[in-house]
Image (cartoon, rainbow, N blue to C red):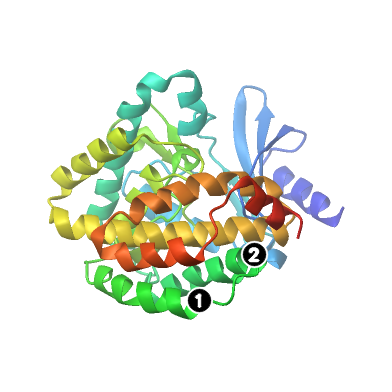
């Protein structure tokens, strides 16, 4: 009730009191979003409760940095840092996922545009206060897999062996010159804005956790999406398109891409398991089989043969019965 009152005061301060409010489905975080309607205008309210460690300062920082380079991050019209409120430009409802349900013929076009933008982001100087996506963070994320997925299934602790295999591979990948990595660069966080030009044709929604890391990471987020399927044919075409635009050494890049994608998919399986058990969001378990399949694709790379063998011997596939066991916890 107190927070509702604070929101009312914030909206009144910016002239949006008495606006019609429509809740927007949010992702895994504790942030809440609403679309506000007033006359013929719309705005987005972000409610990021600082008590739940959801500070808006990173979001504001990276928004301003991205907008300074003419990327379509939403304009900030009002802020209350202490209470965690933002009043944001409404980029619309046409995220890639929802749009492609009705216009699948546009998939190649909009994904290429997303890659064009990714290349442009990588070509910009990393914002000054961006933290490094270093080996400590990468390892911490991998441990989510063993701490939640394996532990829940009562598999004997295998975290040391996983790290023994993955750490040298991750260290190899980290030799690549870093770029800004948005970390959640996938279809539900990208808005198609066809009336805009150049960098502005793809709207960005989720980047507050950005770090300075390997340029392959966001490409893996985009093409090996946990929430929608991208065909192997289109993945290969778009990866080649990215490589032609960036001129990376293909063999080295594909090695790093496979390593980082495997790390990411292990992390996501752990996070989705945690969301089910700790946060009472069992619907995320339904996404794990797709993430598992993405992981299997990563493990085809010869440099990941040892990890592939380890997973085949030690890790239960997320079958219906496996996921049912997790859900019952």
- Dot 2 falls on a residue whose secondary structure is loop
Q: Residue at x 49, y 44 (%)?
A: 290
Circle 1 sits on which residue?
159
Q: Residue at x 55, y 70 (%)?
A: 146
Q: Where residue 154 sits: x, y (%)?
A: 65, 69
Q: Is residue 122 above or below residue 150?
A: above
Mark 1 surroundings within 10 Å by alpha-carbon count, few (fewer than 14), some (14 through 19), many (20 or more): some
**Residue farthest toward the right in the current orientation of the protein:** 1
Mark 1 or 2: in front is 2
Q: Is residue 302 above or below residue 288?
A: below
Q: Where residue 197 sits: x, y (%)?
A: 30, 30
Q: Residue at x 42, y 70 (%)?
A: 138
Which quarter of the picture shows residue 234?
top left
Which quadrant: the C terminus? bottom right
Which numbered circle lies on residue 198?
Answer: none
Q: Where residue 272 sits: x, y (%)?
A: 60, 55
**Side of 12 where 211 appears, left or right:** left
**Residue farthest toward the front in the current orientation of the protein:** 313
**Side of 85 where 307 appears, left or right:** left
Q: Where residue 9 sits: x, y (%)?
A: 77, 49
Q: 221 or 326, which is in the foreground?
A: 326
Mark 2 surroundings within 10 Å by alpha-carbon count, few (fewer than 14), some (14 through 19), many (20 or more): some
Circle 2 sits on which residue?
153
- Dot 1 falls on a residue whose secondary structure is helix
Answer whether residue 47 is visible to the viewer in this image. no
Which quarter of the picture shows residue 265?
bottom left
Q: 203 or 217, which is in the foreground?
A: 217
Q: Is residue 199 above or below residue 303?
A: above
Q: Which of disc 2 and disc 1 is earlier in sequence?
A: 2
| C-alpha separation, residue under disc 1 versus residue under disc 2 | 14 Å
């Amino acid at each position: 009730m107190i927070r509702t009152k604070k929101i009312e005061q914030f909206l009144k301060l910016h002239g949006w009191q008495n606006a019609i409010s429509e809740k927007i489905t949010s992702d895994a975080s504790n942030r809440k979003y609403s679309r506000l309607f007033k006359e013929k205008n719309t705005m987005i309210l972000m409610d990021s409760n600082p008590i739940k460690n959801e500070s808006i300062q990173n979001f504001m920082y990276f928004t301003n940095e991205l907008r300074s380079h003419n990327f379509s991050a939403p304009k900030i019209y009002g802020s209350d840092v202490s209470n965690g409120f933002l009043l944001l430009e409404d980029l619309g409802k046409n995220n890639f996922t929802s749009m492609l349900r009705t216009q699948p013929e546009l998939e190649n076009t909009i994904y290429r545009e997303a890659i064009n933008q990714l290349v442009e982001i990588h070509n910009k100087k990393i914002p000054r206060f961006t933290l490094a996506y270093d080996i400590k963070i990468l390892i911490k994320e991998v441990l989510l897999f063993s701490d939640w997925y394996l532990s829940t299934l009562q598999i004997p602790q295998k975290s040391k062996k996983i790290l023994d295999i993955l750490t040298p591979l991750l260290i190899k990948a980290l030799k690549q010159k870093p770029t800004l990595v948005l970390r959640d660069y996938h279809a539900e966080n990208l808005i198609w804005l066809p009336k805009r030009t150049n960098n502005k044709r793809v709207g960005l929604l989720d980047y507050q956790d950005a770090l300075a890391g390997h340029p392959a990471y966001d490409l893996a987020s985009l093409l090996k999406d946990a929430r929608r399927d991208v065909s192997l044919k289109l993945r290969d075409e778009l990866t080649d398109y990215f490589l032609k635009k960036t001129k990376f050494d293909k063999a080295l890049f594909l090695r790093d891409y496979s390593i980082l994608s495997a790390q990411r998919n292990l992390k996501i399986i752990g996070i989705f398991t945690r969301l089910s058990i700790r946060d009472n969001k069992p619907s995320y378990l339904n996404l794990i089989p797709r993430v598992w399949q993405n992981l299997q694709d990563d493990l085809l790379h010869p440099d990941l043969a040892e990890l592939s063998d380890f997973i085949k011997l030690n890790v239960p596939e997320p079958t219906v019965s496996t996921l049912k066991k997790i859900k019952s916890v």
